[in-house]
Image: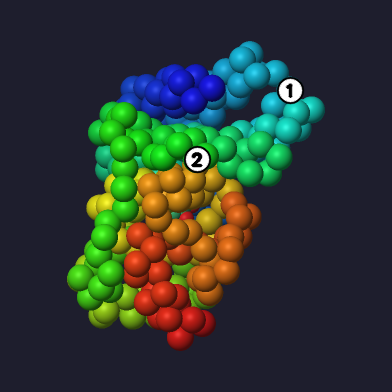
C-alpha cells in the first residue's frame, strides 16, 4: 500500500511544482493570513480521485473538502499542500502530507517535500525513511545545544496559549529557533535528526497525522505540551528526539 501512497504524493507534488511561481487564484479562509490557492484544491482533488479509484469505500478527511465518509476501517488524513503561505509567496518550502489510519491508529505516514524531491515515509513498526534511507532522531540531550523549530497559528494575533512568550523563552534557552512554515516538514526534520525539538499549537489532524508517525518511527517522541499522550486531534504538539523532551515540557508548563 505504501508504494501507492508514494505515487499519489508524488503526483500531487508534480501539480504543485508545476503551479509554483505561476499565476493562480488565492482566497482567504479565516483571515488574510490563512490562504487557499487553486493549486491546494487541484492537488487535493487528484489525491481524492486516486483514493476513490484505488480504495473505494475508504474514509477521507482532507483539509480543503472535509470529510468524505466511507464504509471501511481505513481513513486517509490529507493535507494536499502544507505550507500554502510559503507557496503563495514563492518560498520553496512546502509539502504533501498523507496519513492513513486503520481503526483510529496511524499505520502509514508519507510526506513529500516537493522542491527537494524528498519522500519521507513510515509504516507502523517498520521505521522511518527519507528517500529510502533510514531516519533517526538526533542524540543531543542538552537544550542549550539544540536547534528547535516552531510554527505560529493563523490566530497568532490572539496569542493563543501564550505562543509569543513560549517562543521568547525557547529563543533564550536553545541554540536557535527556526520557523519554516510547513508543520509536516518540521516533523520530518525531527525524524531526520536535523532539529532536536518542535512545538506548535492549533494544528489540525492533516498537519500532523503523517508527521507524528514519522517522528515516532525514527525513534522520537510526540506528546501534548504537558507530556501527556496525544492523538491527531490534540491541537497542541511537542515533538522531539526524546532526550530534550522533559526540558521542553518544563518551559511549556512554566509559561502556561
Ligand atoms: C500550516 C503550516 C504552518 C503551520 C500552520 C499550518 P497550511 O498549514 O503547516 O507551518 O504553522 O499552523 O496551518 O495552512 O499551509 O496547510
Ligand atoms: Ca497544513
Ligand atoms: Ca494545507
Picture residue at 54% right of the left edge, 45% below the top: 209
> Which quarter of the figure is the N terminus placed in?
top right
32 with respect to 73 (left or right)? left
**Residue 238, above or below 184:** below
Helix, strand, or loop for circle 2? loop
Residue 212 in view here = yes
Residue 110 x/y as whole percent: 45, 34
- Count residues near mark 1 (Cα–Cα under 10 Å), then give few for <14, some for 14-19, many for 20+: some
Q: How many marks?
A: 2
Return the disc, 2 or 1, that comes first in the chain's sequence.
1
Residue 160 x/y as whole percent: 52, 72
Residue 109 in view here = no
Picture residue at 25% right of the left edge, 65% below the top: 140
Instruction: Tell me whether the residue at label 2 lies in contact with that at label 1, contact meaning CB atoms closer than 8 angstroms.
Output: no
* Numbered label attached to residue 125: 2
Mark in front: 2 vs 1: 2
- Count residues near mark 2 (Cα–Cα under 10 Å), then give few for <14, some for 14-19, many for 20+: few
* Numbered label attached to residue 180: none
Write down the quadrant of residue 14 in the picture: top left
Of 26 and 124, nearer the camera is: 124
- Extreme-front residue of the structure: 125
Residue 158 x/y as whole percent: 52, 73
- Extreme-top residue of the structure: 53
Helix, strand, or loop for circle 1? loop
Picture residue at 27% right of the left edge, 39% below the top: 92
Distance between mark 2 and mark 1 Cα atoms: 26 Å
Residue 231 x/y as whole percent: 61, 55
* Numbered label attached to residue 57: 1
- Extreme-right residue of the structure: 71
**Residue 8, above or below 235:** above
| Rendering colour mode | rainbow
Amino acid at each position: 500500500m505504501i508504494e501507492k501512497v508514494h505515487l499519489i504524493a508524488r503526483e500531487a507534488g508534480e501539480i504543485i511544482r508545476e503551479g509554483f511561481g505561476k499565476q493562480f487564484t488565492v482566497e482567504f479562509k479565516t483571515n488574510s493570513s490563512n490562504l487557499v490557492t487553486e493549486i491546494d484544491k487541484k492537488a487535493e482533488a487528484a489525491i481524492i480521485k486516486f483514493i476513490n479509484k484505488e480504495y473505494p469505500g475508504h474514509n477521507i478527511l482532507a483539509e480543503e473538502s472535509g470529510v468524505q465518509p466511507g464504509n471501511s476501517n481505513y481513513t486517509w488524513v490529507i493535507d494536499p499542500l502544507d505550507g500554502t503561505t510559503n507557496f503563495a509567496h514563492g518560498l520553496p518550502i512546502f509539502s504533501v502530507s498523507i496519513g492513513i489510519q486503520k481503526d483510529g491508529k496511524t499505520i502509514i505516514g508519507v510526506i513529500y517535500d516537493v522542491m527537494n524531491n524528498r519522500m519521507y515515509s513510515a509504516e507502523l513498526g517498520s521505521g522511518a525513511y527519507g528517500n529510502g534511507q533510514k531516519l533517526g532522531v538526533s542524540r543531543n540531550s542538552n537544550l542549550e545545544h539544540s536547534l528547535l523549530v516552531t510554527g505560529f497559528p493563523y490566530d497568532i494575533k490572539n496569542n493563543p496559549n501564550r505562543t509569543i512568550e513560549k517562543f521568547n523563552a525557547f529563543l533564550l534557552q536553545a541554540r536557535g529557533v527556526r520557523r519554516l512554515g510547513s508543520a509536516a516538514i518540521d516533523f520530518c526534520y525531527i525524524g531526520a535528526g536535523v532539529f532536536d525539538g518542535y512545538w506548535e499549537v492549533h494544528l489540525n489532524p492533516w498537519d500532523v497525522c503523517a508527521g507524528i508517525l514519522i517522528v515516532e518511527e525514527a525513534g522520537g517522541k510526540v506528546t501534548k505540551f504537558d507530556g501527556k499522550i496525544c492523538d491527531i486531534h490534540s491541537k497542541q504538539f511537542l515533538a522531539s528526539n526524546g532526550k530534550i523532551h522533559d526540558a521542553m515540557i518544563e518551559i511549556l508548563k512554566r509559561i502556561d
